[in-house]
Image: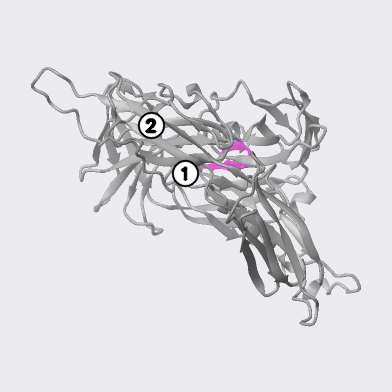
Amino acid sequence: MASRNSSQPATWLWLLLAAAVGAGAQSTSPSAPPADSPPASVSGAVTNSVTGAPVVRAHVSLRIFTNNGQQAYGALSNGDGKFTIAPLPAGRYNVSVERAGFIDRPSAGIAPNATVNLQPGDKREDLKLTLTPTGAISGRVLTPAGEAVDGCNVSVEGDAGSVGGVTTDDQGQFRIGGLAPGKYRVQAAPASLPFPPEIRSDGTRDVHLARTWFPSTLDHKGAQRIQLAAAGDVTGVDIKLVETPIVTVSGKVTGLPEGRAFLQVQRTDGGGGTGTQINSDGTFRLWRLDPGKYTLVAMTQGNGPDRLQSATLDIEVGTADIERLELRMIAPFDIPGQLDFDDAGARQMPQAQQIRQGQQAAPASSRPSPVRRVMMRPADRNFGFSVGSNQQVEVGADDSFTLEKVPPGRYRVSVSWGPYVRAVRQGSIDTDGDILDVRNGPNGPLTLRLGSVRANISGVVTDSNGPARGVQVALLSRQPGMGFLSSAVTDKDGVYHLRSVAPGTYRLLAADSDIMMQVQRSQDADDFKDIVELIEVHAGDNLTQNLTRH
């Protein structure tokens, strides 16, 4: 069965995690021991987590982070799965293991045997490492009439996101390997050029085959989840593509300068996008969009501060043409701003630097004034293109600031010290929370209201077996598509704690990682309203909110 697979086991992701852990500990890692210190050694075995058999030629790596940087030591396992790494200087090592066809699958975010601490002369001989064999999913992509579809892109969506990038052969067959155990949804996306319908003279009509989820649905929520075991090989995953009308989306962009400009079109569920050049008179036309929700934005060529961009426009494509859309180009603009404070704690700056024990603080008159900054970043993160820009500006002694050359968009604003942005005022319009909406340009001077009193949320997560250990709990904005604001993992008693939460209205969810990913990506608040809890948090609250695992 022919396929072209760009997916491989993501074992290397653990190396990145190990590097991050090590980098965080770098400042406390000891320098290299004296040259005359006796060396240490590590030995052990690598086995298959399913069969218990030894894994041959597995690459075991130990990485140490010191004040002088990073050094790796490694070895390959022999025919019995055993390895020895020596000589080793004393220190704390991050451990990883990899082998094609296997995955060093993390547990609760931390890989087994994540670290090894070695003293001079230590001989660690019992390091037991396991690798989990990967699996595969295979099937065919067919037309509604049951004919094979050649060259169709097929991918899977699982706990770690989208994997795949294989294309079907001339029999419509595909196979996606290197998959970790878990639950997956499979989608097929036929190649489709954005051309108008073909005019035919034989009485037949041109049709559009849309992106389709297994077994035959346009909506990923209605897709069947496939359970893949370690070393599993699930076959017969046949996807029958859905036929939809060829619709046209057309309109005009006003305020268009001379030069090339483009219309970017992105699915709001993160499922890819397309685009087209805008005509010199500002008109545009698109064909063959799959049914679903999209965000449109027009922008001129280039990435400099003078690039023009329109406000975003949301549409939903169904079975009818969408016409007479209007987008307006808006030049970057400056926004003068002012800080306002709920209380003295919101105004107070933390001490600029910690005073070490035994030292005396320098006189206040000789200390440099701490720098206060207002920071801004795009609030809508699920686009396949840039909408808005990151920026940070200093706040003056009179609590004023100016955001310069801001492109239209929605932004999340924050400050560089302790308080949170409780409310945003533009001109005479007040909005609770930290969202600055200037998709259609500024609405007057900006005031950021800062608060310092936060809240705590805790509770117990249960499933059909009672309190659930190791479940992720996520706090999300009420506004969809903004990612997680805070998260926690339940302890052995199913208890979670979310601390220092700013007041506001939030969505709260306890779920497996694949559901979390779908909720985070979704741009529609109604998509998952049956599994999330909507909570109102006030300053100083200590809320108890028990949850059910999904």
- Residue 214 position by quadrant: top left
Residue named by callout 1: 409
Badge 2 amino acid: Ala
User: x%, y% of residue 264?
Assistant: 35, 42
- Return the residue nearer the eye: 46 or 260: 46
Q: Which residues are magenta?
A: 424-439
Helix, strand or loop status at disc 1: loop
Q: Residue at x 63, y 35 (%)?
A: 476
In the shown orientation, is residue 412 left or right of residue 545? left
Residue named by callout 2: 188
Give the farthest residue toward the left.
Answer: 201
In the shown orientation, is residue 509 left or right of residue 318? right
Badge 1 amino acid: Gly
Judged by depth in the image, the label closer to the viewer, 2 or 1, is: 2
In the shown orientation, is residue 395 left or right of residue 360? left
Cα gap from disc 2 to disc 1, whole angstroms: 32 Å
Q: State if disc 1 and disc 2 touch (CB < 8 Å).
A: no
Q: Is 28 included in the stretch rendered in magenta? A: no
Q: Is 428 included in the stretch rendered in magenta? A: yes
Helix, strand or loop status at disc 2: strand
Residue 386 versus residue 118 in the image, above or below: above
- Return the residue nearer the eye: 36 or 460: 36
Q: Residues within 10 Å of mark 2 (few under 14, many from 20)?
A: many
Q: Give the main secondary structure, helix, strand or loop, of the magenta stretch.
A: strand
- Residue 433 position by quadrant: top right
